[in-house]
Image (tube, rainbow, N blue to C red):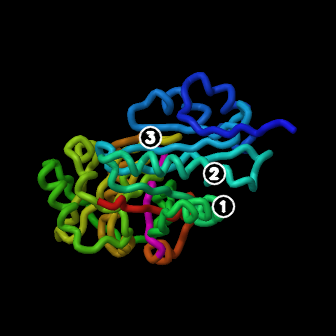
């Protein structure tokens, strides 16, 4: 009988053919498409689980805020070998590796609510379930039925941008949506000068609300909306502000808005949106 030799290692450019040979069922897999960038990056790491030279599973993490936050992801396995616990076997040493990095304070993952297999893996390796988010892409703003109002005032100074974020005493989202697909615990370490410079802030006339919009390139470019209340439809000028930002950034294909479950329930008509499946954030804080 052939001896089954299993090993896990960090991937390099020489592993492209092994990755490409995997049968994951994912058409136009972006991990394959940007593989060279992932394995040569300073903030991304990719690992593979091999048996007798064949890659059976792949996964890794990305680092944010000078390495303080590590988001697990890009997990996929060869469908011919499902049900053998490969994802758990691959992620367990990755978690241990991250725990040994002194700069990393939080380790997490973001996955579809209905992805039961990924959620079981995360629970097995000790990552705890957190908030759920609904991601909607506003594509047809003319169909909105919301309280009208004037476009909100832009905020330019970095000190005021940071002060607005620090002024939040309640956050309906329960997270900070740092980028599309990448929510993190609301933490001051995320609000670097460089990050805040990429974000446009707008404040309501009564100064009781503000919204953050960041042009974010994923497969497409979106106006990524970060709003920390559930009263989107009640705030005069909120959607006019999104529309105005979009008009000034025509390369965006839509406004990506993160809604809490309650905020999502407040939407009476989904026609203006491209609706995505909800996601759930898992995370763990490292012990000091």
Percent across and percent down for residue 145 are 45, 70
Q: Is residue 260 magenta?
A: yes
Percent across and percent down for residue 258 are 43, 62
CA separation, marks 2 and 3? 28 Å
Q: Is residue 192 magenta?
A: no
Mark 1 and mark 2 in contact? Answer it, CB < 8 Å: yes
Front tag of 3 and 1 = 1
Closest to the observer: 201 or 145?
201
> In the rendered image, which residue does mark 3 sit on?
217
Front tag of 1 and 2 = 2
The first of marks 2 and 3 along the sequence is: 2
Q: Quadrant of the N terminus?
A: top right
Residue pictured at 48% horizontal, 51% vertical:
95
**Residue count near mark 1 (Cα–Cα under 10 Å), binned few <14, some 14–19, many ≥20:** few
For residue 126, the mark is none
The first of marks 3 and 1 along the sequence is: 1
For residue 87, the mark is 2
> Is 74 located above or below residue 231 in the figure?
above
**Residue count near mark 2 (Cα–Cα under 10 Å), binned few <14, some 14–19, many ≥20:** many
The boundaries of the magenta stretch are: 253-261
Name the secondary structure under disc 3. strand
In the picture, measured across the screen, residue 94 lies left or right of residue 52, that is: left
Front tag of 2 and 3 = 2
Residue 57 appears in which quarter of the rendering?
A: top right
> Is 2 located above or below residue 190 in the figure?
above
Q: Quadrant of the C terminus?
A: bottom left
**Residue count near mark 3 (Cα–Cα under 10 Å), binned few <14, some 14–19, many ≥20:** few
In the picture, measured across the screen, residue 170 lies left or right of residue 119, that is: left
> In the rendered image, which residue does mark 1 sit on?
117
Name the secondary structure under disc 2. helix
Name the secondary structure under disc 1. helix
């Amino acid at each position: 009988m052939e001896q089954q030799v299993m090993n896990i290692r960090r991937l390099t450019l020489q592993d492209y053919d092994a990755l490409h040979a995997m049968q994951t069922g994912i058409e136009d897999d972006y991990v394959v498409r940007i593989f060279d960038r992932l394995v040569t990056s300073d903030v991304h790491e990719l690992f593979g689980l091999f048996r007798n030279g064949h890659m059976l599973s792949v996964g890794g993490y990305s680092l944010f805020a000078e390495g303080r936050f590590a988001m697990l992801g890009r997990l996929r396995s060869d469908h011919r070998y499902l049900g053998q616990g490969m994802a758990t076997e691959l992620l367990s040493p990755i978690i241990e590796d991250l725990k040994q990095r002194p700069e990393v304070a939080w380790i997490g993952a973001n996955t579809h609510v209905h992805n039961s297999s990924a959620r079981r893996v995360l629970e097995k390796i000790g990552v705890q379930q957190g908030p759920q988010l609904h991601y909607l892409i506003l594509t047809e703003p003319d169909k909105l039925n919301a309280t009208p109002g004037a476009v909100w005032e832009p905020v330019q100074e970095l000190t005021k941008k940071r002060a607005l974020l620090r002024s939040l005493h309640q956050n309906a989202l329960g997270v900070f949506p740092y980028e599309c697909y990448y929510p993190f615990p609301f933490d001051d370490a995320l609000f670097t000068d460089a990050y805040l410079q990429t974000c446009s802030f707008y404040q309501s006339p009564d100064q009781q609300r503000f919204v953050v919009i960041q042009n974010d390139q994923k497969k497409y470019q979106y106006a990524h909306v970060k709003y920390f209340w559930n009263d989107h439809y009640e705030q005069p000028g909120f959607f006019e502000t999104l529309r105005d930002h979009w008009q000034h950034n025509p390369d965006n294909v839509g406004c990506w808005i993160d809604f809490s479950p309650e905020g999502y329930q407040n939407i009476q008509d989904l026609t203006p949106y491209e609706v995505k499946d909800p996601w759930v954030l898992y995370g763990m804080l490292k012990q000091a």
